[in-house]
Structures are given as structure tokens and as C-alpha cells.
Amino acid sequence: MHKFISVVFLALFLLMPCTSRADDGKTAILVVSFGTSMPEARQAITNLVEAARKEFPKYEVRLAFTSNIIRRKIARESSGVILNPVQALAALNDEGFANVCVMPTHMIPGEEYDEIAGVVDAFGGLTGKYGFKTLELGTPFLNGVDDCEGMADVLLSRFKTQLKDEHTAIVLMGHGTPEHFANALYSQLQLALDTKAYGRFFVGTVEAAPKIEDVLARLKRHPEITRLVLSPLMIVAGDHAHNDLAGEDEPESWINILRKNGYNEISTYLVGLGLDKNIADKFTAKIHELMD
């Protein structure tokens, strides 16, 4: 931890030609996302940022990406600069913001969320001109049973047209966090969906459990399902959605695996959850909870 705080101090000095004490009246919301290198997918993140700006017009709202690979790719290809959370918090401090709410766009509190929490903890330990008066970290979209129930309602609304056909099921791909307790929230979401619409939703992840093999095993227990809709359980419909889920030229993509197992009527809905109004409403509601 001491080493990390030293790195934070270094970032502060590198970023700031001068520093000033924070004004107690200045509040900012820092939206933190993993990011995406696909420009067309980035609108889902922008939608959440704009929702926060509309809901909290008196506060400064900014964006940071946690993925250095994506940040460097964006800088290389478009000359745009997106700060990481350390840089963004240092800049807010330098500009005199006293109160900061850090709001993640992550689906579960997995490894990525843990890293953000580490940054917030480190800055929270700073005092004097380099510290904030208040610095709070919000929770991801799935952070417990109630969140999973709420997400199930969002998904039922999102796919209400497709679900009118009793032979259609929705297959959702989450990212997943291997060997992390938070990954169990995908199973909790599946339970919530089964309670509200049994046999109509099948949740899997690309990097952890449940895997596509688990999704297939559950599908086989529902012979009445002959048509599938594939969609990402992610804020953005980026590389995982277009390649791992729906990649026609990817032999191990979910769409090709499902076809090999007899599901020939498959459509895709490659739209990030961040573009869903109900998700944006949940996002701003979590900010309200954080501020309260």
C-alpha cells in the first residue's frame, strides 16, 4: 500500500504544474469504465456519462478508463486522451474539487472493481492539499440480490418483443471474473430470471462460469426452445460481443457452437446495456444512493 501511495504522489506531481486547496463547494462525479476500442460501441459509455450530467447538472462529470491498452489505442488512432482513474482523480484535486463520487460502469464487483477500490482507498488516505474532503466509491450494477432482481426486470423489458414467441430464448454473455467470489452474481441473476421467466433466459460468461457448455446443458433441458437471441450482458457491445459471441468467422464463437448443436434459428442483438434507458436510470439512482 505504501508503494502504491508513493505512485499516486508521483502522478500528482507529474500532472500538476501547481496545486491548490480544494473548495468545499466543488463536487465531481467520476465515471469509471473498462473502456472499449470500438468507436461505435463507445456510445454506450457516453450514454451513461450524459445521463449523469443530465441528472446532476450542478456537478462536474468526467470519464476515466481502466484499460491502459484501450487508452493507448485510442490515443494512437484518434489523438484523443482518456485518463486512467489515478490521473483523473489527481486532475480533479488540482482543480480544487473537494467532493468526488467515483461511479463504476462494471457489471460485478470483480477484479477490475477491486483495482478501482484500491485507487480510491489510496487517495482517501491522503490529507492536506492533496486530499479530498469526501471521496466515495459506488457499486457495480450487480452488487447483491436486490440488484439481480432489478436487472432481471430490465432484461424482461428489454426483450419483451422476442419473448412473445414461446419457442424463443435469450442467451446472454457476461464477461466473468475467474476465481473471484463476485462471479457468483451471474448465477444469482440466472436465479432471478428463472423466477420471473423460467426457461427463457440463459446466462453464461466468456471468461469464467457458467461457460457456453453450461448454457448448452441447460438449453437441452428445454426442447420447446428452438429459436435463440444472442446478446451481450455487458455495458458495451465491443470485441467480446462481435467476436466471442457472434463472430461468424470464429470457430469457437457462441453462435457457431450453438449451430453445431442443432440451433439453426439464431438472431443477434448486439447492443450494449449502456444504451438502455432503464440501465441509465439505475446508474443515476446508484449515484443518488452514493451521495445520500
Image: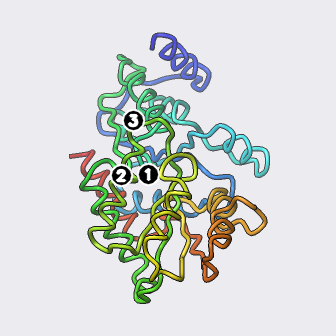
Q: Could you say whether the residue bearing mark 1 is in a helix, strand or loop?
A: loop
Q: Which residue was labeled with disc 2?
A: 142
Q: CA distance from mark 1 to mark 2?
A: 6 Å
Q: Which mark is residue 107?
A: 1
Residue 215 pos. (x, y %): 50, 62
Q: Could you say whether the residue bearing mark 3 is in a helix, strand or loop?
A: strand
Residue 32 vs residue 229, the one in the foreground: 229
Residue 98 vs residue 163, the one in the foreground: 163
- Which residue shows up at 47% across the image and 16% down it? 5
Q: Which three-letter amino acid code belongs to the residue tagged 1?
A: Met
Residue 115 pos. (x, y %): 48, 31
Q: Which residue was labeled with disc 3?
A: 97
Which tag, 1 or 3, sits closer to the chain's start? 3
Q: CA distance from mark 2 to mark 3?
A: 29 Å
- Which residue shows up at 75% across the image and 61% down it? 251
Q: Is there a contact, CB below 8 Å, between mark 1 and mark 2?
A: yes
Q: Which three-letter amino acid code belongs to the residue tagged 2?
A: Leu
